[in-house]
Amino acid sequence: MKEFLAENNLCGQTVLLLVSRGNAIIAELLRLKNYIPKVFRLENKQDIQKYNEIIFDFFYFKISDSQEQKIENNEALRDIDEEFRDNNLEILKRFYLLFESVHSYVIDLNRYIEELEEGFYIHQTLESVFLDAEGKQLLCEALFLYGLMLIMIDAYIEGSIRERLLVSYYRYTPQRRDTQSCFDEVCKLLRDTGLNSVKKPLYYPEDYFQRIPLHSTYVDMVIGVQL
């Protein structure tokens, strides 16, 4: 059998690239956590008074039509909204790309495990990759990185702020039909978990990790592995 990480070994190169992506996502998260615009925290009275009609959590999606009409009909609100968009659009795009990359990562990880199970990689199965030292290391690291992404996002970008960032991105960025479903799935994955400095929600972080279920056999094998 050819070496798992040989350049012509598609099975090994695919998971190696996936793990490299995971590390890049973690690095971007560590950079961006220091650049959350303070206004999205809505921590002081001035920000609340000025922006509470244009910064929303996911409740916005239930009242979007009426709220947009309200902004359109109020010149002062419209001016504030336009100024806010111009000042924050670029950082909103960057945060959204980070959130989307986490979603894409777990989707691609699931797809890779499914391809192993379905025999897509010749002479390779989930079990055979775990028997290879390098393969086992990478499969464990791939799962570890995903869990780390979720925990770090919840620790550094609290749920209410994530929702406000996502809603603002949605409002200020034209949503093409082919990207709408992806946006919806990103929102489902990264909606507020309820975690804060005062309490930890019941069944946390298990429920958080279950928002996009991972292949159970794969998870069990990682848990039981001895490196």
Image: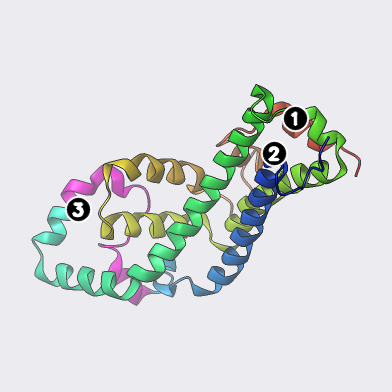
Q: Earlier in the sequence, mark 2 or mark 1?
A: 2
Instruction: Give above or below for 164 relative to 2.
Output: below
Which residues make up the magenta segment? 45-67
Of helix, strand and loop, which one carries label 2? Answer: helix
Q: How far separated are the C-alphas under marks 3 and 1?
A: 54 Å
Q: Are marks 3 and 1 in contact (CB under 8 Å)?
A: no
In the image shown, does 148 or 131 lie closer to the viewer?
131
Q: Quadrant of the N terminus?
A: top right
Of helix, strand and loop, which one carries label 1? Answer: loop
Measured as percent of width and height from the top left, residue 110 is found at 61, 35
Residue wearing tag 1: 124
Residue wearing tag 2: 11
Q: Are marks 2 and 1 in contact (CB under 8 Å)?
A: yes
- Single out the mark in the foreground, 3 or 1: 1
Label of residue 170 in the image: none
Instruction: Give above or below for 82 relative to 124.
Output: below
